[in-house]
Image (tube, rainbow, N blue to C red):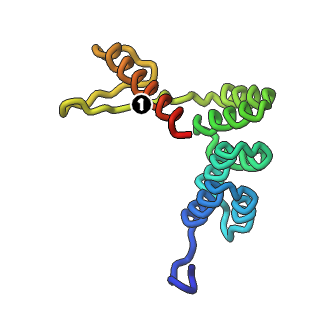
Amino acid sequence: MKRKYGIEPKNEHYACMIDLLGRVGLLEDAYELITKMPMEPSAAAWGALVHACRMHGNVEVAKIAAPRLLELDPEDSGIYVLLANIWANGRRWGDVKMARRMMRERRVKKIPGRSIVEVEGQFHEFLAGDVSHPQSEGIYNALNQLFAMSKLEDCFEK
């Protein structure tokens, strides 16, 4: 990259490559790249690897990468949730408990999902599970219908 384009690769470039390798399932190659980086890998680089581990169900690489990611960003609740999901998919219930316990001990709070929807030029904001909006019943009915339709579509794609 430096020779051909005169660009010195930065952490962001490495994180993108790790993400690309991870998306196609080349987790060992992604891990090798992260270990050979000429600078200290960022949370984005480790995060890309951990996300790829979830995508491909690779618990072993996640076990190596997760502590590095938590070391760099211990306050990010999404990391703990991601790890608990990886461990649960691998049926590692002790690790699921550990992730949740670490979250409690570090007093990390899960941030609820937030959505903004535009209807007839007006914006409506709501949190996951929020029923305070005056039209929440209609909103959840519409969401349930969309969800059911998407599941129905999945049946016909295979």
| Direction bottom: furthest residue | 3
Vertical side of 145 occupied by 34: above or below: below
Q: Nearer the viewer, residue 131 or 103?
A: 131
Q: Looking at the picture, how far across and down is residue 137, in whole percent?
A: 35, 13
Q: Looking at the picture, how far across and down is residue 35, in whole percent?
A: 74, 63
Question: Relative to 78, is 31 on the left or the right?
Answer: right
* Local secondary structure at mark 1: strand
Question: Relative to 154, is 122 on the left or the right?
Answer: left
Question: Relative to 88, is 7 on the left or the right?
Answer: left
Q: Does residue 71 appear anywhere in the picture? A: no
Q: Residue 92's quadrant in the figure? A: top right
Q: Looking at the picture, how far across and down is residue 147, in whole percent?
A: 45, 27
At 78% from the left and 27% from the top, the residue drawn is 93
Quadrant of the image containing the N terminus: bottom right
Question: Relative to 42, is 113 on the left or the right?
Answer: left
Q: Looking at the picture, how far across and down is residue 109, in whole percent?
A: 57, 28
At 71% from the left and 49% from the top, the residue drawn is 68
Q: Does residue 51 appear anywhere in the picture? A: yes
Vertical side of 65 occupied by 20: above or below: below
Quadrant of the image containing the C terminus: top right
Q: Nearer the viewer, residue 11 or 48?
A: 48
Q: Which residue position holds label 1? A: 114
The three-letter code of the residue at mark 1 reads: Arg
At 51% from the left and 35% from the top, the residue drawn is 156
Q: Nearer the viewer, residue 6 or 109?
A: 6
